[in-house]
Image (cartoon, grey):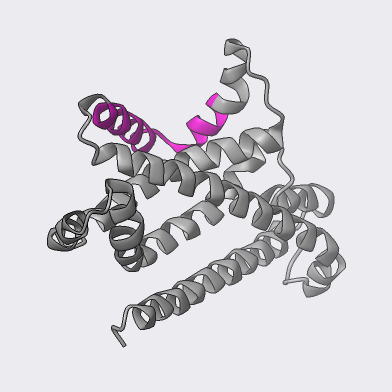
């Protein structure tokens, strides 16, 4: 058991690759759901309708105030009590999407509120509707403000996929657990997936830098 066996990592590379692909899939699909939820809740938070503001605030507080693991358990094990039976992969996407959506909602809200109010008023004075002003003026400028914190939340989402191993979803961490169960070599397995998680998040960080620069150029800020 002594020493680091690099050959073991090489031997199980196909399994690690399978887990990495699953992690990427769950991350991207959950992100798509989270963005939709986050944007809707952000718009509700700044709505003039008090009921929508209260409902959005309740959702955000509930998500941010409870552990992601409990939310995963609730969606997978608790929802059947209400007649909703989800497969493990579907429950994984729904739970992570709901969780990340709560954080993105506040990120999006802060970005929208960070846009100069005078520009929004100028759009309305030109005869634009609320929706047109939001789509053509506010959101493009808010996008520049939300990219860095949203990228940070995406990295948290990628790392959060490791919790899916608790409901037997075959993502990266679950694959490592299975390898350890066969080889009894935890160091090699967990070092390998640690490197994979690091590489995935490094790509996200670099992508965020590229996107932020592109947005700045498109808005004539560079």
In the figure, is residue 133 to the left or right of 178? Answer: left
Q: Main secondary structure of the magenta part?
A: helix
Percent of width and height locating residue 3: 73, 71
Q: Quadrant of residue 146?
A: bottom left
| 24 shown above or below 90 | below
In the figure, is residue 40 to the left or right of 47? Answer: right
Chain part drawn in magenta: 52-74
In the figure, is residue 166 to the left or right of 215? Answer: right
| 167 shown above or below 19 | above
Which quadrant of the figure contains the C terminus? bottom left
Percent of width and height locating residue 15: 82, 58
Q: Residue at x 37, y 67 (%)?
A: 148
Q: Quadrant of residue 192?
A: bottom right
Q: Residue at x 51, y 36 (%)?
A: 69
Which quadrant of the figure contains the N terminus? bottom right
Percent of width and height locating residue 97: 52, 42
Q: Is residue 92 magenta?
A: no
Q: Residue at x 51, y 52 (%)?
A: 157
């Amino acid at each position: 058991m002594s020493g680091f066996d690099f050959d073991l990592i090489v031997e199980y590379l196909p399994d690690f690759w399978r887990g990495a692909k699953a992690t990427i899939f769950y991350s991207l699909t959950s992100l798509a759901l989270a963005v939709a939820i986050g944007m809707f809740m952000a718009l509700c938070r700044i709505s003039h309708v008090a009921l929508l503001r209260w409902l959005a605030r309740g959702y955000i507080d509930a998500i941010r105030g409870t552990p992601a693991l409990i939310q995963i358990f609730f969606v997978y094990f608790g929802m059947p009590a209400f007649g909703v039976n989800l497969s493990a992969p579907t429950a994984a996407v729904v739970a992570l999407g709901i969780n990340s959506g709560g954080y993105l909602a506040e990120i999006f809200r802060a970005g929208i509120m960070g846009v100069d109010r005078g520009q929004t008023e100028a759009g309305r004075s030109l005869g634009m509707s609320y929706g047109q002003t939001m789509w053509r003026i506010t959101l493009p400028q808010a996008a520049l403000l939300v990219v860095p914190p949203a990228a940070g939340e995406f990295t948290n989402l990628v790392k959060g996929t490791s919790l899916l191993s608790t409901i037997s979803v075959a993502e990266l961490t679950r694959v490592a657990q299975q390898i350890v169960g066969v080889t009894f070599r935890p160091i090699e397995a967990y070092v390998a997936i640690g490197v994979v998680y690091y590489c995935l998040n490094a790509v996200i960080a670099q992508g965020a830098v590229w996107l932020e620069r592109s947005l700045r150029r498109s808005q004539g800020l560079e």
